[in-house]
Amino acid sequence: MITPQKINRSAIQIQAEVLSNKKVGPYHHIVFAVDKMAAACKPGNFVAISVGGEQSALVLRRAFAIYRASDKGPMGGSIELVVAPHGQGSKWLCAQNVGEFIDMVGPLGTSFGVPTTNANTLLIGGGYGSAPLFALAEVLKNRGCRVDMVLGASTAGKIYAPLEGKRSVSSLTLTTDDGSTGIHGQISEAIPRLIRENATEVIYSCGPMGMLSAISKIAMEFDIPHQCAVEESMACGIGVCMTCVVPVKNDGEIKMVRSCIDGPVMDGSEIIWDRKSVLDALHP
Amino acid sequence: MITPQKINRSAIQIQAEVLSNKKVGPYHHIVFAVDKMAAACKPGNFVAISVGGEQSALVLRRAFAIYRASDKGPMGGSIELVVAPHGQGSKWLCAQNVGEFIDMVGPLGTSFGVPTTNANTLLIGGGYGSAPLFALAEVLKNRGCRVDMVLGASTAGKIYAPLEGKRSVSSLTLTTDDGSTGIHGQISEAIPRLIRENATEVIYSCGPMGMLSAISKIAMEFDIPHQCAVEESMACGIGVCMTCVVPVKNDGEIKMVRSCIDGPVMDGSEIIWDRKSVLDALHP
Amino acid sequence: MSSLDFSTKIGSKRFSNPIFTASGCASSGQELSQFFPLTEIGAIVTKSIMTKARTGRATPRMAETPSGMLNSIGLQGPGIDAFLENDIPWLVSNSAKIIVSIAGETVDEYGVLARRLRAVPGISAVEVNISCPNVENRGQVFACHPDTAIAVIESVRRNIGGELPIIAKLSPDVTNIVEIAQSVINAGVDGLALINTLLGMVIDTNTMKPKLAGKTGGLSGPAIRPVAVRAIYQVHQAFPNTPIVGMGGVASGRDAFELVLAGASAVSIGTATFGNPTAVLQIRDQLSELLLEKGITDFRDAIGFAHRGV
Amino acid sequence: MSSLDFSTKIGSKRFSNPIFTASGCASSGQELSQFFPLTEIGAIVTKSIMTKARTGRATPRMAETPSGMLNSIGLQGPGIDAFLENDIPWLVSNSAKIIVSIAGETVDEYGVLARRLRAVPGISAVEVNISCPNVENRGQVFACHPDTAIAVIESVRRNIGGELPIIAKLSPDVTNIVEIAQSVINAGVDGLALINTLLGMVIDTNTMKPKLAGKTGGLSGPAIRPVAVRAIYQVHQAFPNTPIVGMGGVASGRDAFELVLAGASAVSIGTATFGNPTAVLQIRDQLSELLLEKGITDFRDAIGFAHRGV
Ligand SMILES: Cc1cc2nc3c(=O)[nH]c(=O)nc-3n(C[C@H](O)[C@H](O)[C@H](O)COP(=O)(O)OP(=O)(O)OC[C@H]3O[C@@H](n4cnc5c(N)ncnc54)[C@H](O)[C@@H]3O)c2cc1C
Ligand SMILES: Cc1cc2nc3c(=O)[nH]c(=O)nc-3n(C[C@H](O)[C@H](O)[C@H](O)COP(=O)(O)OP(=O)(O)OC[C@H]3O[C@@H](n4cnc5c(N)ncnc54)[C@H](O)[C@@H]3O)c2cc1C
Ligand SMILES: Cc1cc2nc3c(=O)[nH]c(=O)nc-3n(C[C@H](O)[C@H](O)[C@H](O)COP(=O)(O)O)c2cc1C
Ligand SMILES: Cc1cc2nc3c(=O)[nH]c(=O)nc-3n(C[C@H](O)[C@H](O)[C@H](O)COP(=O)(O)O)c2cc1C
Ligand code: FES
Ligand code: FES
């Protein structure tokens, strides 16, 4: 449990200047000047961004996982995001030019827990879900951990795996649903073999909920800790609205915890992945 | 009356590129590439523009009087507007950069009627209301009319009177409420003298409703025709919503006519300017 | 690409496609015909007509609101005589499908209007507007109470004769819209129009007074779409066999599809036309594309789909 | 610049400024205190609390809509025991002004909650939420009918004792909100909170099913502001002496001013906080600036100003 005083204790609200905005495959890699905010960002944290401009009919912020943060650079502290132009908000963000100022709140949420010993780790990312894993890989590598990474997507072009990101990784496996690159099939099919081969001791994952659920099952079978970054629709991002909840086990009952405060990084074994059992419990 | 078939018969909907956008005093002078639309534009017509972009919470178009239209030029047909950054919509428009495309419908509404003989005309504009008068002055001049112009505003900086606009004018009088330039006082105070001095036979006006009302009274006293371009809040601009109505005399009764179709240029002597009498008649 | 049967039915009448104009948002069609032939749309629903010519409210009559607008036109119009003399013949000569919207100040006036329409050729349905919020007192909003709603519909039914479908247009500003729907269905309507505008107000913070001359006005536009979807869903759930003309904030084919999935057999476009004169056509085309993308080749299969299966 | 008396009163209680949080949009204050000290705002209105801990609805619990959002949280919360044990002491230790919102499934539960609050020090008022649309059946929306609304308020009044002001929070989803206001005023409330969310629905056109797990949800945000202004105006017109806590789509000082001019003695900020964690402070500052611009030096002179004069 996170104690009340600790809620988002380093979150601030800033006007962040767009320093760079580049299309990388189907994604946009966007760099923001965030000054002091950068120093507080940990792998797994996210930022919440106002979208649509002044006349906007979009009243809610959008959450984006922090891809990288560097607290010093030629422009001061900066953070980088990987954004998929999906609906109205993300398309607007991807269309912002260098020099525009963006209203940003962060860093928010929990970050990935890092093992105290030099464990063998497996990092699993789906689509833009790979974003927060590269910064994590670096931290793990510096701690002396072995870092294996597996990235999957529906098709080759949708795997986000920049060259510089691969530096911290001992092995990188790719999977695609259509077989256009790497292993043909769902990411979860490749995992058991990787766990065995690399003697994985901790799993970290980020991606669509279906993928996280499948990984959780495997982690359970292998009895390995699994930290996953979930993605639920968030209205506020700061813990006040209760829309972003994820069902977790609580003495045989269901407890809904806020993924923006008690997440996005959560213990995969605590989450109740089976939607039907949740619905049955809530509406008997 | 305008017969049904003639309603906005030359109006089209286009994506107009911003060719230039310059701040001129408190206004923005904006030029749009409008191709064939330009040829149909007459002095007094207006265009209706979508504002706020794709995520916009602003659902209604904004009307702008056409300042100038030229049907041939290096970029094909173009029109020019003079926009006061006032509220959300106009501020958005003033912030658009060269190269952006703007959704525009036009030309809309009635245009200024031009005398068949070479009459002495007085053109009266308040604030950005001077915009449509310069194109009118040119037409009148070409017809052999004498064109006197009087422009007023609260203060010197708010008078829109570009150099090239003055070419077609025999005399130009300025008035300001604060006396910062020209005659000190309201525009209407200066008019009787000008009518007498220039033997004015027709008055054209465009500006705030209060000013038009005052001019109408003077025109009535001098028994001179007065064509004024009114400005009522418009939801559709094309005659389907009935929000933009202006009360006119109709056999001793009140008739509400649409200023977007039967206006904006209307016969000043037909309009019922006294708001109280309208309210009394409508809500007895 | 497979082809789509885009036709729909309200009562006994067939319409070539389900996208209509909304009453009061397309006048009597002439102004829009400058932008496209009226035969392109399913039907034109005319501005609610009253027995006599009517001046309407003083200005200001409108205020923009976030993703919407308020209006208080107050049913300005030429009256039924001039309407039948000028507007209907023009629409007929332009081969438009016509739904005539009527509004009265009393139950009897609705009857009078219905009687005037019974012998008029070229009309496909009558929409009975019992839900205009822009009247002098709320008591005139007949759709606010089952008994007054029934009285109006019975008066129309008695007078209209024949098989002209009657559509009752309801207000969302009620505690229980299903109850009102129930009452007018019992009184014999062939369809429902959902929803009219919500009663709203804007105060001008400069003058510190209500912005509209009529103080309150009707709220329309995308802002109210979730209320429209909810109302249509509730009523279709209760009365799946009563066709609904849905409306309220539709500005795209996606939006129209949302209302159809909730239970609308046709969708009227109001405020969107103010922002875009060709909105009805664009929405029609986007909707047909969406249907085909979903593998739906008969429009009627989509009506109320959100109620079915898991 | 002259100074402003920004204080306001609800019943017997004074608040240093009229900008409050809205129930359910600020939890119990701890999360917002990361961004500013809670003493900066007039009061924190806590998320409606029930007798027992409550899991709330399944997800998805929200959908963005044009200039608004739908939510169906289903009153998730820790229950009154844990609330009194953890949240109230924390708020008191942070010197926050507290208005506790309560919600029950039955009339008796409201009474039980009121009794639990009567002896708790540090509370400034009780807001009785009888208008949450996110309940299993509409019958539970006590604010939909005068008799159920009265029953709840009487139960609270009987149990709360003392002089803790009672504020009844009403729903705009009724045919006649003035009638409901009348009934709870007769039952002895000290103030009204207007408005709760409107019942709405969004259908996901990809899945072709309702987007929210609970199907319907409550519509909030700027989209509904004209409905809030209208409701506040109507009720203040009828009962000028009953203080109103206004809310519904306020996102700027201008918006807050609009509700005050309509008749609100205080303004709660809900959805705007989701878009901007410091919205309440910005709105407070913008409002005080606007008041001074207008030459208003006593906030209370602005309340209901749109009703006065010409
Ligand atoms: C913790 C977290 C981290 C995220 N990280 C990234 C990232 O690194 N890169 C990235 O491209 N996107 C990320 N997202 C998704 C992002 O927040 C937006 O939801 C997504 O860009 C779609 O928003 P939109 O405005 O384009 O689409 P719309 O369809 O306009 O969105 C409508 C509403 O639905 C919500 N929504 C839609 N899709 C999703 C989704 N998949 N998950 C959650 N809410 C959704 C939106 O937030 C919004 O409130 C993340 C979401 C969360 C919760
Ligand atoms: C026929 C006509 C010609 C016009 N010509 C010009 C012009 O040449 N240059 C120019 O700067 N403006 C002109 N206007 C005013 C312009 O249409 C906008 O109303 C103005 O720019 C304010 O809009 P906004 O979005 O900035 O303000 P907002 O306050 O956001 O507007 C809100 C709503 O109120 C309406 N509104 C606000 N002020 C006015 C006003 N003075 N008159 C009518 N409606 C108003 C808006 O159209 C909009 O619907 C003209 C208006 C009309 C009707
Ligand atoms: C300016 C205006 C005038 C309207 N006039 C009428 C009318 O005369 N009769 C009627 O039944 N509805 C009238 N309506 C309501 C619309 O037909 C429609 O029900 C409502 O606007 C919701 O749809 P929308 O959001 O697409 O506009 C009017 C709406 C507007 C905006
Ligand atoms: C996510 C969410 C949760 C809410 N929970 C409650 C609640 O528990 N009790 C209550 O009385 N109102 C609740 N409301 C309603 C708000 O307090 C407020 O009345 C409404 O949202 C309108 O204000 P707004 O537009 O500023 O959000 C909730 C609103 C939202 C958006
Ligand atoms: S997004 Fe609001 S509580 Fe998590
Ligand atoms: S603006 Fe719609 S009729 Fe004139």
Image (cartoon, coloured by chain):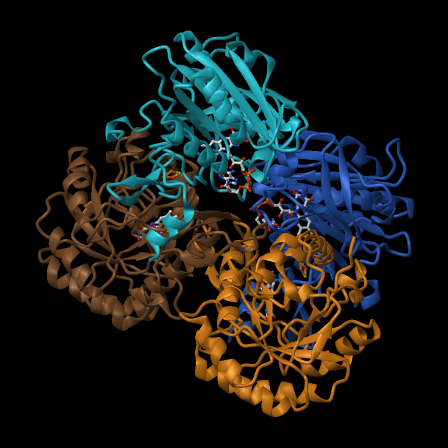
Chain colours: A cyan, B blue, C orange, D brown
Q: Tell me the quadrant of the picture where the N terminus of chain D can be found.
A: top left
- Image spot of residue C116 (x, y percent): 68, 88
- Front residue of this view, candidates D218 and B117: D218
- Front residue of this view, candidates C39 and D112: D112
Q: Residue at x 84, y 54 (%)?
A: B10
Instruction: Please tell me whether residue D21 is drawn above or below residue B281 in the rendered image.
Output: above
**Residue C170 as seen in the image, left or right of residue A264:** right
- Front residue of this view, candidates B17 and A148: A148
- Number of labels in the image equals 0
- Image spot of residue C46 (x, y percent): 68, 72
**Residue C107 as seen in the image, left or right of residue D74:** right
- Image spot of residue D211 (x, y percent): 49, 52
Q: Toward which corner of the image does residue C18 lie, by quadrant?
A: bottom right
- Front residue of this view, candidates C178 and B101: C178
Instruction: Please tell me whether residue C206 is drawn above or below residue B83 in the rendered image.
Output: below
Q: Residue at x 36, y 25 (%)?
A: A225
Q: Residue at x 72, y 75 (%)?
A: C14
Q: Toward which corner of the image does residue D142 lie, by quadrant?
A: bottom left
Instruction: Please tell me whether residue A222 is drawn above or below residue D288 in the rendered image.
Output: above
**Residue B186 as seen in the image, left or right of residue C213:** right
- Image spot of residue D305 (x, y percent): 36, 55
Q: Toward which corner of the image does residue D160 lie, by quadrant?
A: bottom left
Which corner quadrant of the figure contains ligand 6? bottom right
Q: Is residue C227 visible?
A: yes
**Residue B25 as seen in the image, left or right of residue A237:** right
Q: Is residue C219 visible?
A: no
Q: Residue at x 38, y 17 (%)?
A: A40
Q: Tell me the quadrant of the picture where the C terminus of chain D can be found.
A: bottom left
